[in-house]
Image (cartoon, helix red, strand yellow):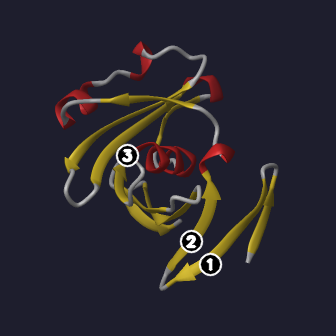
């Protein structure tokens, strides 16, 4: 029920068919967070236009009231032009916005987060890969 990672022990639990991890935001790598004004701007973003010295997390609200956003993540410095679903970035954006979120990323991967004012973020979700859904 725990993972030992370089940052420390990470709690792992299960919620139905989802695996749930609780982590602290400061454990995640730094991301340049880009707040965009529309999904059109988000989808039009070209990964080649973002410097390769840091990871870039682009996002926009699709339903602010319900806490639903659409996101993309570029990490050319890690050899990842675009990530399908990024748990570390989901932890960072949840802490950045200080609220629970539903994050849709990539081809339709969905990440659910729960924010805690004590500095913890609970994260679970499903990843879509090659047209199939896998439990993350």
Q: Are dots 2 and 1 in contact, CB under 8 Å?
A: yes
Q: Secondary structure at mark 1?
A: strand
Label 2 crowding class (10 Å Cα cut-off): few <14, some 14-19, many 20+? some
Who is closer to the viewer here, 132 or 67?
67
User: CA gap, disc 1 to disc 3?
Assistant: 25 Å
Q: Which mark is residue 20?
A: 2
Q: Residue at x 57, y 47 (%)?
A: 88
Q: Which residue is mark 3?
A: 106
Residue 130: percent from left, percent from top: 42, 54
Who is closer to the viewer here, 131 or 95?
95
Q: Which residue is mark 1?
A: 13
User: CA gap, disc 2 to disc 3?
Assistant: 20 Å
Q: Quick check: 37 left or right of 118? A: left
Q: Residue at x 51, y 14 (%)?
A: 51
Residue 72: percent from left, percent from top: 39, 38
Label 1 crowding class (10 Å Cα cut-off): few <14, some 14-19, many 20+? some
User: CA gap, disc 2 to disc 1?
Assistant: 5 Å
């Amino acid at each position: 029920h725990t993972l030992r990672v370089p940052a420390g022990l990470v709690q792992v639990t299960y919620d139905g068919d989802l695996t749930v991890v609780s982590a602290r935001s400061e454990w995640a790598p730094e991301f340049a967070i880009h707040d965009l004004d529309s999904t059109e701007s988000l989808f039009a973003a070209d990964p080649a236009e973002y410097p390769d010295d840091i990871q870039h997390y682009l996002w926009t609200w699709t339903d602010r009231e319900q806490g639903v956003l659409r996101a993309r993540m570029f990490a050319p410095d890690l050899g990842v032009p675009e990530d399908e679903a990024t748990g570390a970035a989901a932890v960072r954006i949840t802490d950045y916005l200080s609220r629970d979120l539903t994050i849709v990323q990539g081809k339709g991967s969905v990440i659910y987060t729960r924010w805690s004012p004590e500095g913890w973020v609970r994260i679970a979700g499903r990843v879509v890969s090659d047209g199939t859904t896998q439990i993350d």
